[in-house]
Image (spheres, rainbow, N blue to C red):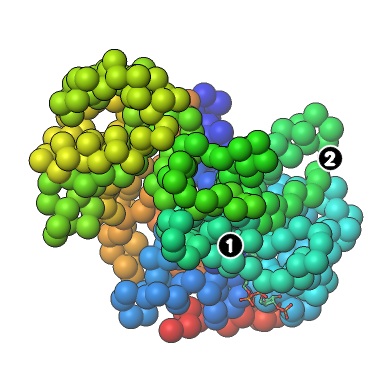
Amino acid sequence: MDKRDMKALEGVRVLDMTHVQSGPTCTQLLGWFGADVIKVERPGVGDATRGQLRDLPGVDSLYFTMLNGNKRSITLDTKNEAGKALFKKLIEACDVMVENFAPGAIDRMGFPWEKIQEINPRMIYASVKGFGPGPYEDCKVYENVAQCTGGSASTTGFDDGPPLVTGAQIGDSGTGLHLAFGIVTALFHREKTGRGQRVTCAMQDSVLNLCRVKLRDQQRLAHGPLKEYPQYPHGEFGEATPRSGNASGGGQPGWIVKCKGWETDPNAYIYVITQAAVWPQICDVIDRPEWKTDPDYATPDARLPHLARIFEAIEAWTRTKTKFEVMDTLNPLNVPCGPILSMKELAEEPSLRATGTVVEVDHPTRGKYLTVGNPVKLSASPADVQRSPLLGEHCDEILKDVLGYGDDEVQDVWTSGALGQPNVDAAE
Ligand code: CAO
């Protein structure tokens, strides 16, 4: 094959021991870039998400199918002796191993990092855990626990309400992204040294990394109020970064304002940023030309105590227009803004289909479903998004392709019980 046609990670083989969301996000990314991802699943059961939140009886859930595209599936009982021997061979044959079991689970299977390194010194062994070393290192963690312990929940929501979790899966998918970056970095390092290494990512750390502007604000608090927060100038600031509602995290004030139809449509809103550079254009459009020169409004600092009033005036104008009409008016004026798009609108958006960000794939038991394609676009190695595998769909193929087994050896492996029973479907 002409090397110019190769996918960026073609030739990299990934032993994918992941389940639920954080690990599968990581390995799906590697798969999109062309890695051969071999998903190892427990016989008869598989990844627990195959059976979670099912919308169709007996069919792999969308939870599973949308996180496990571009992978092959093999069932393997890592607690069975023959299964352990096969697992060892797969470790020898792969470049990267990824897991996100509860702390200690891989060790209990009999494969601690030291042993993996001994079996394959070039192996890059990547793990997601809820916490790094410290008081909580043995805890199991799911998405919202990570959002709460990583600083997101305490800084999300309105000042007079409780902490809030966000719909963006920053704990799971966010950590999967970080881990994929660590793996590719370790592969790059291996090119130079010939050695593998261990890559670990804690969900708490990943969430905190994504919330770094809030730790920035924590330190700014020592030097006075956070003037871009809605608490300024009338509210109180406590000891910690407060919840900032819909205020912009950057230095350019922004807020969500109502648009025409908001009374019945929960998404008839738009985010508008009053970027300093376009202040005169905003004043004209909302019919407040006097604010261009009024000393209380003319400069960004002067405007800070009046932000609530400014956004009220903007809203008085946006309420007369749909969110798309507001967008059509403000965009030519270079005013940064964005309509609140519903999942329905995103699913139907033609431009996202055209770029492969939303993709329809065909599945043998589900039929067609939508998935989010690769948001990272490489000019020389575009991703083709494939459907998720059925449980154990590629057992024979992997034994033959990856381990070079013949038909008789494949039969022996089945007889040993290493792969579980043939043709056992995922549990209901
Ligand atoms: N063959 C045999 N046994 C297998 C197997 C296989 N192929 N695959 C998994 N198992 C076993 C594991 O060895 C483990 O057994 P032991 O507890 O006896 O050692 C068992 O299955 C279950 O693993 P688990 O404890 O990881 O699973 P859980 O459902 O109890 O916990 C979770 C799930 C996500 C809370 C936990 O895995 C975790 O904290 N992971 C790290 C953080 C993380 O990634 N969280 C995000 C998940 S997405 O929201």
Q: How packed is label 1: few (under 14 Cα within 10 Å), some, or many (20 or more)?
A: some
Residue 195: mark: 2
Q: What's the CA distance linking mark 2 and mark 1?
A: 37 Å
Where does residue 68 sit, x and y in percent of width and height? 48, 58
Q: Position of residue 250 (x, y in %)?
A: 49, 33
Q: Residues within 10 Å of mark 2 (few under 14, many from 20)?
A: some
The residue where tag 1 is placed is 148
For residue 24, which quarter of the picture?
bottom right
Q: How many marks?
A: 2
Depth order, front residue of 140/149? 149
Q: Which residue is at the front of the view, 295 or 3?
A: 295
Relative placement, left or right, of 290 versus 271 is: left
Q: Residue at x 15, y 26 (%)?
A: 287
Q: Is residue 231 left or right of residue 221?
A: left
The quarter of the picture showing ligand 1? bottom right
Q: Determine whether, in the image, residue 82 is placed left or right of residue 266.
A: right
Residue at image point 28% right, 64% down: 367
Residue shown at 17%/40% (left/top)? 316
Question: Element at badge 1?
Answer: helix
User: What amino acid is found at the position of numbered circle 2 in the picture?
Assistant: Arg
**Amino acid carrying mark 1 in the image:** Cys
The x and y percentages for residue 231 are 46, 47
Q: Residue at x 71, y 71 (%)?
A: 139
Q: Tell me where residue 377 sits by quadrant.
A: top left
